[in-house]
Image: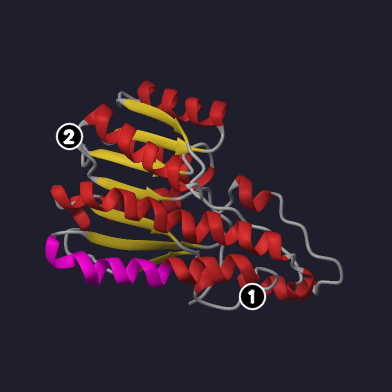
Amino acid sequence: MLRFEDKVVLITGAASGIGRASVERMASEGATLACVDVQNEAVELAAKQARALGAEALALVCDVSDPKAVRHAIASTVSEFGRLDSLCNIAGILHFDNTHELPLEKWNQILAVNLTGTFLMCQAALPHLLEGGGNIVNMSSTAALAGHPWTAAYSASKGGVLGLTRTLAIEYGKQGLRANAVCPGSVSTPMHQVFQLPEGADPKLLERILPLDEFRGPEVAAAVVAFLASEDAAHVNGEQIRVDGGTLS
């Protein structure tokens, strides 16, 4: 199945987790890939793995919260491959804190990467995506859809991503652009593996964010990213898809 043959896809957060799984999934389906991440060596490895799967791949180091770096990443992708068909914003950071103890600096950092970074990538990519009827897949979270303890900044940022996604879908839909979001939950990634309960936290609150069956690997979310970025989702626009094992059902 080569749904991405002759398609250029840029994936942020490509070095690990859902981003890395999305690189591998789309490489296996024929995509030409721009792998973007702030981790130099790890993003090079992601691009190398994509090439091993038969894809043409470019590794780009970029802090998505830096407007200049974002513009450079988009320009480098278009310069290298001549076009951009799909933007998958998967880069993100997470930290668990009691809200009354959350430092403003950490709040600003999480919003800068998760929300502002998504906005900056979309803004820089839009002129190129509109040239060929491209699409955007943004990474939100079940934390945007229901109360998650200890994640005030993360939940706020991911809720903002949903609002941004819907706005893009409506604003540019008649020009041929699609914009959708994935809302993972109970997906095991390096970001979640460092989870620690804040001091004094009630562990019973964890029951609110556990799946009905078990945690799954990032490939389950990558499969939905690939669907939304492909022509199989040609009639899907402004949508959010939960990938959470029934957590919020």
Distance, label 2 to label 1, CA atoms, is 43 Å
Q: Is residue 124 left or right of residue 13?
A: left
The residue shown at (72%, 75%) is 205
Quarter holding residue 49: top left
Q: Which mark is residue 6?
A: 2
Position of residue 100 relative to residue 227, above or below, is below
Three-letter code for the amino acid on which mark 2 is drawn:
Asp
Query: Does the stretch in magenta take in 208?
Result: no
Looking at the rendering, the stretch of residues picked out in magenta corresponds to 162-175
Q: Residue furthest front?
A: 68
Q: Secondary structure at mark 1?
A: helix
Q: Is residue 180 left or right of residue 36?
A: left
Instruction: State the residue position of label 1.
Output: 208
Q: Is residue 210 left or right of residue 175?
A: right
Residue 75, how many percent across, how many down? 31, 36
The residue shown at (35%, 25%) is 53
Residue 24, how many percent across, how many down? 40, 35
Q: Badge 2, how many Cα within 10 Å: few under 14, some, many 20+?
A: few
